[in-house]
Structures are given as structure tokens and as C-alpha cells.
Image (tube, rainbow, N blue to C red):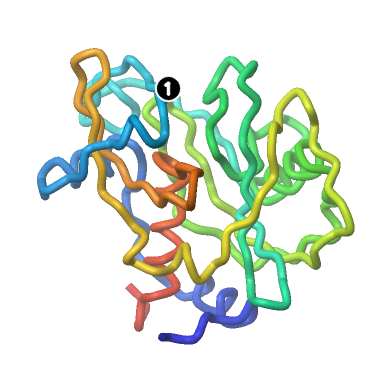
Amino acid sequence: MTPLPTPAEIAARLARPRAVRARGDVATATALLAQGGLHPYDAERFGPLPSSSIPYPQGAGAPGARVKRIPAAVLMLLLGRPEGLSVLFTRRTPELKRHAGQIAFPGGRLEPGDADVVACALRETEEEIGLPRHTVSVLGRLDPYLTITGYEVTPVVGTAAPPSAFAPDPTEVAEIFEVPLAFLLDPANHRRERRIVDGLTRAYYAVPYGERYIWGATAGMILNLYDVLSASAPG
């Protein structure tokens, strides 16, 4: 098994020059549908999933589609545990208007007071889970991910010492949990899936972890991290 990179090695790989790829709901679906061989979604195991009613040709990132892009950022937070690095996730509360109940990284849209996407990711993380922004060491950024609804999300990668406790915002966060980085970077755990929703075919990446179903934009960002960390040379 290939040893996991250290935070210093992760920062070095994120800093390498690379060609920015188009990443997002539409780009991912287009590529996956062209490849074929997708696994059907296991609805019996994971239950119903919310979905946008926007057809891919009309979503943000589709050729000719005019959708306003909204800057946003999330924090992919690496926590040092005795058994190795883990990545923090949240489960959104079922009462939220958007993406209710889904697994996500802490984050949100860029606000006027945010200096940049890094400041946005750190602010949102502090607001959502109570982790002080000054305790996070930023390692770098990944390529922006464009959701079908127009959110252009920049994943910011950072590391921190595990706090004694988190303080989740009960209006936004139903659960905080961690997944070993080794699990997320193992290609055996990366699934290409499809499902039919209201007559629309949906295709996306998923990284199921036990009873938790990590999919869509969040899984796409995990694959982005895998691509960067597994690349042997810039490009």
C-alpha cells in the first residue's frame, strides 16, 4: 500500500503548477455517461436522495447555458489522529432549503466581508462547527467545482489539531463525522453511479462509507483531491 502523504507533502502537491480542469455536476455527468458502465444507485440501502429538476443541458457549465455563477468555498479539513489523517464531514439538517440532509464539507457562499475563498471557507467552518479559524493551517486549494445550480465552489484544504469538542450550529449541522484519508484516496472506494429522477438520468461519483452515502459535488471534490495527490508530475 502506498504511504499516505504528510500535510507538508500535500501542500507541496497542491502548489504544483497544473492545468485546471472543468469540474462540476454537468462536466462529471457528461464524462460518466459517455464512459458508460455505471452502477445503479442502491435506493434500498441509502434511501431517497434529493435532486435538482434542472436537465443537464440547462445547468451551469453546459454549453450555451446562461446561469449566474455564485462564488463559494468549502474546507476539506484534515485532522491528525493517532491512526492517521482523517477528513471531516458534516451532515446538513433536514430543515434546510438547499441540500437538506446531505453529507458535505463545511462551507458556503462568498460574503462581502470575505477577503477571498480561503477566508470564506474558514469563516463558514467556524460558524458551522465552532472550529476557530486561527487554528487551521491552510495547505492549498483544489480546482473550483461548479454545481448545476451555479455555485462555483473552491475546495480549500487545511489541517488542524483535533479539538476537544466541536460546537455545531444546530440549524445547519445535524452531524459531524470523520473518514480516514486512506479510505477516501483508495480508488477501490470510488464509484461511478447513475439514477433516474423524474425521468432525468443523473450520473455522478460516490464514495459510500458504511451507512453514509457521500456523493455528487462532495464526492467530486474527493476525486479532485485524489487526482492531485496521485499525480506523479505537474500538468
User: Does residue 41 appear left or right of residue 106 in this picture?
Assistant: left
Q: Position of residue 5 (x, y in %)?
A: 54, 81
Tell me the quadrant of the picture where the C terminus can be found.
bottom left
* Residue occupied by mark 1: 50
Q: Where 194 falls versus 18 (above or below)?
A: above
Residue 105, quarter of picture: top right
Residue drawn at x 64%, y 42% as measured from the top left:
90
Residue 33, quarter of picture: top left
Q: Position of residue 14 (x, y in %)?
A: 52, 70
Residue drawn at x 56%, y 75% as measured from the top left:
10
Q: Position of residue 148 (x, y in %)?
A: 37, 28
Q: Where 201 falls versus 71 (above or below)?
A: above
Counting every numbered tag in the picture gives 1
Q: Nearer the viewer, residue 208 or 128?
A: 208
Residue drawn at x 44%, y 73% as measured from the top left:
229
Circle 1: residue type = Pro
Q: Secondary structure at mark 1?
A: loop
User: Does residue 48 appear left or right of residue 71 in this picture?
Assistant: left
Tell me the quadrant of the picture where the N terminus can be found.
bottom left
Give the class, few, some or many, for how many residues have Cα within 10 Å of label 1's Cα (few <14, many ≥20): few
